[in-house]
Image (tube, rainbow, N blue to C red):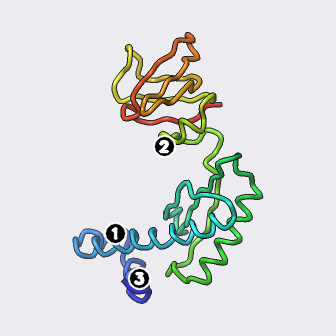
């Protein structure tokens, strides 16, 4: 899909009354493909900028807030937490790269943020990285009658995570595939 094609799709979407047009399957598919293609291009550019500055991309998304469109990028750094100045630095460089690449065929606000102190734990690497930290883990299937575990991550061996419960000090081990949702806890 060329840049001109993308601009035509955006113009058509903006001309439609709210909620109309997406009921046409072909039009809906074109919009979905456009968004997925744009996200891939943005992610590649964001990764390039992040790598040059010593960061990694935790997440990238496109959304709307009222009439405003947002390009939202969450950056991370393995050896420490992300600061406001890190976000400002990445934002300035990524904004320049976006302007130069001319990838986004509509007006947008760029939002750059950190994963936060109570960030989601999304993969096994996060459990290794945050061993010793307090977390809240919601399990798909209860282990020893427990479906919500709050406590310190003790270890991550293979795909088995062990957490020491804050409630009773008991260690609870579960397979990573049994995790429904998890995040660090202050």
Residue 3 vs 164, above or below: the answer is below
Q: Are marks 3 and 1 in contact (CB under 8 Å)?
A: no
Q: Earlier in the sequence, mark 3 or mark 1?
A: 3
Q: Residue at x 44, y 33 (%)?
A: 158
- From the top left corner, tell me how far across and down residue 21 is, in percent: 29, 74
Farthest right residue? 85
In front: mark 2 or mark 3? 2
Question: Which residue bears the numbered disc 2?
Answer: 122
Judge left or right: residue 36 versus residue 69.
Answer: left
Judge left or right: residue 186 versus residue 161.
Answer: right
Tag 1: Cα neighbours inside 10 Å, few (<14), some, or many (≥20)? few
Q: Secondary structure at mark 3?
A: helix
Question: Which residue bears the numbered disc 3?
Answer: 6
Q: Which mark is residue 32?
A: 1
Tag 3: Cα neighbours inside 10 Å, few (<14), some, or many (≥20)? many
Q: What whole-number distance in Å separates the C-alpha atoms at marks 2 and 1?
A: 25 Å
Farthest bottom residue? 4
Quadrant of the frame with the C terminus: top right
Nearest the eye: 48 or 111: 48
Q: Secondary structure at mark 1?
A: helix
Q: Residue at x 49, y 64 (%)?
A: 62
Q: Earlier in the sequence, mark 2 or mark 3?
A: 3
């Amino acid at each position: 899909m060329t840049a001109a094609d993308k601009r035509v799709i955006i113009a058509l979407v903006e001309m439609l009354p709210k909620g109309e047009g997406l009921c046409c399957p072909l039009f809906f598919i074109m919009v979905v493909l456009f968004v997925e293609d744009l996200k891939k291009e943005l992610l590649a550019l964001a990764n390039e900028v992040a790598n040059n500055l010593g960061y990694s991309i935790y997440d990238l998304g496109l959304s709307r807030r009222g009439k405003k469109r947002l390009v939202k990028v969450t950056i991370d750094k393995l050896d420490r937490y992300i600061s406001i100045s890190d976000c400002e630095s990445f934002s300035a460089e990524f904004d320049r790269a976006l302007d130069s690449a001319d990838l986004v065929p509509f007006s947008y606000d760029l939002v750059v943020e950190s994963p936060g102190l109570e960030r989601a734990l999304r993969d096994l690497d996060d459990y290794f990285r945050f061993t010793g930290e307090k977390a809240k883990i919601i399990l798909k299937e209860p282990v020893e009658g427990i479906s919500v575990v709050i406590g310190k991550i003790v270890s991550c061996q293979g795909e088995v995570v062990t957490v020491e419960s804050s409630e009773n000090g008991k260690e609870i081990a579960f397979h990573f595939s049994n995790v429904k949702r998890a995040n660090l806890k202050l």
